[in-house]
Amino acid sequence: SSKDAMTPAVAFYNSSMGEALHRRKAIRSDLRQAIDDGHLELHYQPKVEMQTGLITGMEALVRWQHPKRGRISPMEFIPVAEQSGLILPLGTWVLQEGCRQAQAWSAAGLGDLRVAINMSPVQVLCQDVVGIVAQTLEDTGLPPNLLEIEITEGVLMQEETKAMQRLRAMRDLGVHLAIDDFGTGYSSLSYLKKMPVSCLKIDQSFVRGLMENEEDARLSRVIIGMAHDFGLEVVAEGIETLEHADFLRHEGCDLGQGYYFAKPLEHQAFERLLASPPPWQHQPVGMRSSAL
Ligand code: C2E
Ligand code: MG
Ligand code: MG
Ligand code: MG
């Protein structure tokens, strides 16, 4: 009877946990190969000035087309990369490629756009990230003020850590620092006045609820006001509708990012977007509803 009792658990393990574990292992070993073979790619999502509709920069987002498994989301493979240490070579590649591309667009006369690169806490903690950033700027020729590093709140939690010294050193290079997914982490706001950041990104979960949820609207308003009090720029991410854009522009949000403007685009599509006036510039953000 003890054997009977075990059977369902074993069957559950085999069919579900075993598969998930197998997939994680496969992702880990295939990711190493993908980095070496150059199978990763960057897509770019524009950051748009809310008042003018101009594209001032873009966030680089890594993409992986697996030869057998198809497209794998960074939400799945970035955590695996962080646990295995692969985030270090992966992150360095993203940084180099993003800076190279931004400098190439600038040299081609497409605009002096600021490229935003997501940086994992592991990258900040476990390597000479300042040296890597400085070397990348030198190698690519990208001016430091055209690079922005996006980090999450957790990295900023303790003030006098190695991580904090490194972030300050990056800031001293002239690179911008932004706090990604702001409002979702557990954090004390007192760090805002001491930290070397120049920008807050309102998490998309708040933007999504703007029209239905008074709490989300209030939170977004508070974050924008507070950021400006501290002299910081505010970006809203996950803007999907004209209503979101109107609300945030009206509240004084500086920059916006989201499917309403454009999804993350492969580099050719991003170039086409830069070369032709995008639809939201014919009728500036926020002007449509009031013009009716
Ligand atoms: P994130 O940095 O907060 O990036 C924003 C995510 O929201 C991206 O998902 C983007 O495609 C998505 N997004 C943008 N606008 C909208 C919208 O209007 N609606 C909705 N529903 N989603 C929108 P993605 O590309 O799947 O990346 C997910 C996360 O993976 C990123 O969140 C970031 O934390 C991480 N990630 C992506 N690329 C890199 C990278 O190169 N390095 C590191 N360390 N992390 C990365
Ligand atoms: Mg980001
Ligand atoms: Mg984010
Ligand atoms: Mg996120």
Image (cartoon, helix red, strand yellow):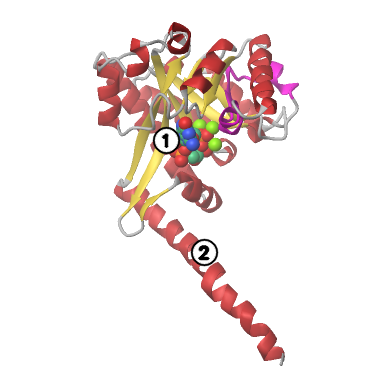
Foreground: 2 or 23? 2
Q: Which residues are magenta?
A: 189-210
Residue at position x 56%, y 68% in the image: 17
**How many residues crowd around disc 2 within 10 Å: few (fewer than 14), some, or many (20 or more)?**
few
**Residue 241 visible to the viewer:** yes
Q: Residue at x 69, y 85 (%)?
A: 5
Q: Is residue 216 left or right of residue 57?
A: right
Residue situated furthest front in the rendering: 292
Q: Give the crowd class for mark 1: few <14, some 14-19, many >=20 residues within 10 Å.
A: some
Camera-side residue of 138 and 222: 222
- Was residue 199 drawn as part of the magenta stretch in this picture? yes
> Can residue 175 be seen at all in this image of the molecule?
no
Residue receiving disc 1? 61
Question: Relative to residue 119, is residue 170 depicted above or below?
Answer: above
Q: Residue at x 60, y 38 (%)?
A: 125
For disc 2, the marked residue is: 20
Asked if labels 2 and 1 touch by Cβ distance under 8 angstroms, the answer is no
* Residue type at tag 2: Ala
Q: Is mark 1 within 8 Å of ligand 1?
A: yes
